[in-house]
Amino acid sequence: MSAPQHQELDPKLDLMVERIVRVSPERAWAAWTEPEHLRQWYAPSPGVISDCEIDLRPGGVFRFVPRQPDGVEHHVLCCYLEVVPYRRLVWTDALLPGYRPAPTGFFTAVMTLEPQGESTLCTTVALHRNEADRNNHVEMGFYDGWGTVLDQLGAYAPSM
Amino acid sequence: MSAPQHQELDPKLDLMVERIVRVSPERAWAAWTEPEHLRQWYAPSPGVISDCEIDLRPGGVFRFVPRQPDGVEHHVLCCYLEVVPYRRLVWTDALLPGYRPAPTGFFTAVMTLEPQGESTLCTTVALHRNEADRNNHVEMGFYDGWGTVLDQLGAYAPSM
């Protein structure tokens, strides 16, 4: 695996998954940034995204609600930090929208898109404050979760 | 006092100080963003800034070291979030440079500049995650500290 552009990786603190998606960076970007698209793939199946709110600007809200088949919902509230269309999207749950420090929160996500012929390399990195948070994220199912949704992105995006 | 542009204020969670500085927004911006200037006014006298590092971009480092007359130094490491030249500067100690969640950290600062004739209204707002953090910040001397340094900015900037 190669490190994504502009993002140094610390293997003790960070987690990464990447997939080739058979669409252009522009379409992959739309899948990541438009709620009607994000809802189609961002929860590991058979879960669904029951609600999603996106204000696509630094300081803007990124809120989504994965719902498991048993009806349990998990409300996730993040703040976008960087928005570089078709290239790079950064958000964190350590700050609320508007940048206020969050009561809880433990990761920053850096998603990058790189054209690869007619496809796109989509890389997501999760940055943590310490090894314990990183390892907890693995135990919470990081690879299954983020890996599965990137597979779902790959299956969904060509049909958009 | 008026709320600064684009920054909603929650009086239970936020703290604000503002001062009229008798220079242009461009010069006030230089005072905030160039280490050789910042070092001249950013520590409440008789303290000094013994070191300062600025990488003026979202995700860049804002590091400074206030030194008290007895030699005690306090190392402060922040991450810039928004850089809008001559208008608005946002940074937090809740994220490290590069956006990694910080081990500690409790505030986000929003500094705005608004031209007022030949002077500039400089407003600084500190956002906190809860009332306890806000009140601790007051007890730590927020008004004396931030108020004093803005007075020092007002005295220094016209001589730049």
Image: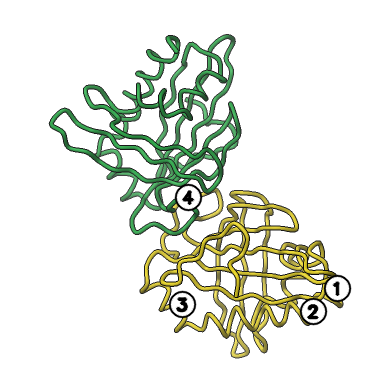
Chain colours: A yellow, B green
- Give neighbour class at mark 3: few <14, some 14-19, many 20+ (Cα, 10 Å): some
Mark 4 and 1 residues: CB-CB less than 8 Å, in contact?
no
Secondary structure beneath label 3: helix
> Do the residues at pointers 2 and 3 share their chain?
yes
Please, what is the three-letter code of the amino acid marked with disc 1? Met
Looking at the image, is mark 2 or mark 3 earlier in the sequence? Answer: 3
Q: Amino acid at mark 2?
A: Tyr
Name which residue type carries label 4. Arg
Disc 2/disc 3 C-alpha distance (Å): 26 Å
Mark 3 on the same chain as mark 1: yes
Residue designated by label 2: A156
Q: Are marks 1 and 2 in contact (CB under 8 Å)?
A: yes
Answer whether labels 3 and 1 touch (C-beta < 8 Å): no
Judging by the rendered image, the residue that carries numbered circle 4 is: A100
**What residue would you read off at disc 1?**
A160
Q: Residue at x 62, y 49 (%)?
A: A58
Vertical order, A90 against A2 (above or below) = above
- The residue wearing badge 3 is A137
Q: Are marks 2 and 4 on the same chain?
A: yes
Earlier in the chain: of badge 3 and badge 4, it is 4
Q: Secondary structure at mark 1?
A: loop
What's the CA distance linking mark 4 and mark 1? 35 Å
Label 4 vs 1, first from the N-terminus: 4
Question: What's the chain of the residue with tag 1?
Answer: A
Which quarter of the figure has residue A28? bottom right
| Amino acid type shown at disc 3 | His
Q: Mark 3 or mark 1: which comes first in sequence?
A: 3
The label number, if any, that marks residue B47 in the structure image: none
